[in-house]
């Protein structure tokens, strides 16, 4: 135990030390930490070492090294959609009653810092030093590979997760694996009902796997390195065994969108072959067949797999509307859903507010829903201004659609930070890759 905690502590400290020695490597370490370690709550001489402290330190060092020392002009283009959403929601929180504004502001500040600072840094450094993208690329590949292999180990652990339990106990946090260890597995080749691998929660793990599958697919399309196909298969299997059906559904929605927009015969043929193969595998395994039947089970009665049916979701939607009566326009306050659960536990109808729609309505009402729609439209416009190749635009669209579909299906439990950071990397990578492609084109005589 002491050895693992010591290693994690050194891992966290190295992010800070590297910020002064090799800033690009420090950012790569930070992203690896997000994937491989579920929490950051150390204390050094009584001083808290947290995500907010690390984010603040990285921002200070970045400003000193780049805008001040290297005279690099900051570019805010990437941040515009995020600044619009966050500051609009902050202003909206001033018009809510019945919830302490101090709690609202602290929730807003933590989410804003975790989502925007590192993403903003990645975007700006990548414009002048594209080598950062290679650091992040290899950090993602190595970290995801390690986490996925550990996910395979947890297949036969009956829901027990020795690593996250150890880290959770050290930080005094209830481990999600303890909650889900009693669940029956949905797959007959696994003894675990839910798998979170190296992360704090199975739903966070499943979302990161969805993001990783799109990023690794993009890296493969641009490089044609076949080992990435093996990693893609490993990621896909981990999505299946994670026990979170929303991951499969969200990725499928995103993939269907990409196929419709891309319209390449070769890709469509390969997809049909893959779907045929997958169908044969599903039909040969009763638990897999039952799992996929549950996706089209509107009533929740045709499949043995239990979960939220469409009927339940509609009841919860009505519950959200009932919750904000007399607060329809501005909702009950920024972070109200988290505030409610911290005081009362699960909601009698909305349970854990398991949809982004419920979270938005309860926290910020109809105006908040409009702000989120504008946010996604601004993202839609952003990467169309930055990218030239249609396939790159469709890949980024797929990334955003997958996030939206996943959050609508599960809620919003700190997903925005992963989305913003990985979106910044993917957009920067595609922009830089396109620039390299243009530079290699020789003029014809």
Image (spheres, grey):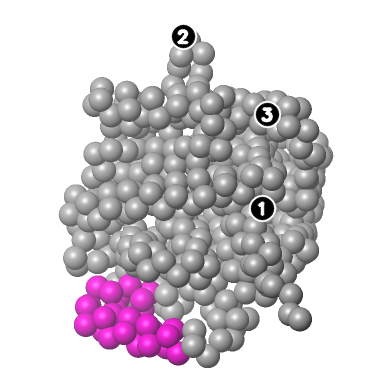
Magenta stretch: includes residue 279: yes
Residue on which disc 2 sits: 45
Query: Would you say residue 112 is visible in this rendering?
Result: yes
In percent of the image, x 26 and y 81: which residue is there? 281
* Residue range of the region highlighted in magenta in the rendering: 269-294
Structural distance between the alpha carbons of marks 1 and 2: 40 Å
Q: Is the N terminus in the top left, top right, bottom left or bottom right quadrant?
A: top left
Magenta stretch: includes residue 155: no
What kind of element bears circle 2?
A: loop
Residue 20 vs residue 322, the one in the foreground:
20
What kind of element bears circle 3?
A: helix
Structural distance between the alpha carbons of marks 3 and 2: 28 Å
Foreground label between 3 and 2: 3
On screen, residue 406 above or below 294:
above
Extreme residue toward the front, this view: 445
When asked about the image quadrant of residue 188, the answer is bottom left
Whichever of labels 1 and 2 marks the residue nearer the N terminus, that label is: 2
What kind of element bears circle 1?
A: helix
* Residue 360, numbered label: 1
Residue on which disc 3 sits: 65
Q: Is the C terminus in the top left, top right, bottom left or bottom right quadrant?
A: bottom right
Extreme residue toward the top, this view: 45
Label 3 environment density (alpha carbons within 10 Å; few <14, some 14–19, many ≥20) = some
Foreground label between 1 and 3: 3
Structural distance between the alpha carbons of marks 1 and 3: 38 Å
Query: Would you say residue 348 is visible in this rendering?
Result: no
- Position of 174 with respect to 60 (left or right) is left
Percent x, y of residue 397:
64, 68
């Amino acid at each position: 135990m002491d050895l693992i905690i010591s290693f994690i502590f050194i891992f966290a400290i190295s992010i800070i030390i590297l910020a002064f020695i090799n800033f690009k490597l420090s950012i790569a370490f930070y992203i690896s930490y997000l994937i491989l370690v579920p929490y950051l709550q150390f204390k050094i001489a009584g001083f808290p070492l947290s995500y907010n402290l690390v984010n603040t330190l990285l921002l200070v060092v970045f400003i000193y090294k780049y805008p001040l020392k290297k005279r690099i002009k900051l570019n805010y283009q990437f941040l515009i959609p995020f600044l619009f959403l966050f500051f609009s929601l902050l202003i909206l929180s001033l018009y809510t009653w019945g919830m302490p504004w101090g709690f609202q502001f602290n929730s807003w500040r933590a989410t804003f810092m975790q989502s925007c600072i590192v993403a903003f840094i990645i975007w700006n450094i990548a414009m002048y030093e594209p080598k950062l993208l290679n650091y992040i690329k290899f950090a993602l590949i190595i970290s995801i590979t390690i986490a996925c292999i550990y996910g395979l180990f947890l297949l036969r652990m009956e829901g027990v997760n020795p690593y996250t339990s150890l880290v959770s106990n050290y930080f005094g946090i209830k481990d999600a694996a303890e909650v889900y260890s009693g669940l029956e597995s949905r797959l007959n080749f696994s003894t675990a009902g839910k798998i979170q691998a190296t992360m704090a929660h199975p739903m966070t793990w499943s979302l990161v796997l969805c993001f990783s599958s799109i990023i690794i697919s993009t890296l493969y399309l641009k490089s044609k390195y076949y080992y990435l196909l093996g990693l893609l298969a490993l990621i896909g299997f981990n999505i299946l065994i994670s026990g979170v059906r929303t991951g499969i559904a969200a990725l499928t929605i995103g993939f269907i969108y990409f196929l419709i927009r891309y319209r390449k015969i070769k890709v469509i043929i390969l997809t049909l072959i893959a779907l045929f193969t997958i169908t044969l595998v599903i039909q040969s395994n009763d638990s897999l067949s039952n799992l996929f039947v549950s996706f089209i089970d509107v009533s929740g009665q045709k499949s043995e797999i239990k979960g939220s049916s469409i009927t339940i979701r509609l009841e919860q939607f009505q519950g959200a509307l009932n919750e904000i009566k007399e607060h329809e326009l501005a909702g009950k306050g920024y972070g109200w859903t988290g505030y409610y659960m911290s005081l009362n536990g699960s909601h009698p109808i909305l349970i854990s507010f398991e949809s982004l729609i419920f979270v938005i309505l309860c926290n910020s009402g109809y105006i908040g829903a409009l702000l989120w729609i504008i946010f996604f439209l601004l993202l839609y416009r952003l990467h169309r201004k930055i990218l030239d190749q249609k396939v790159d635009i469709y890949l980024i669209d797929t990334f955003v659609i997958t996030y939206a579909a996943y959050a609508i299906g599960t809620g919003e439990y700190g997903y925005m930070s992963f989305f913003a950071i990985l979106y910044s990397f993917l957009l920067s990578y595609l922009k830089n890759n396109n620039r390299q492609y243009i530079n290699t084109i020789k003029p014809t005589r």
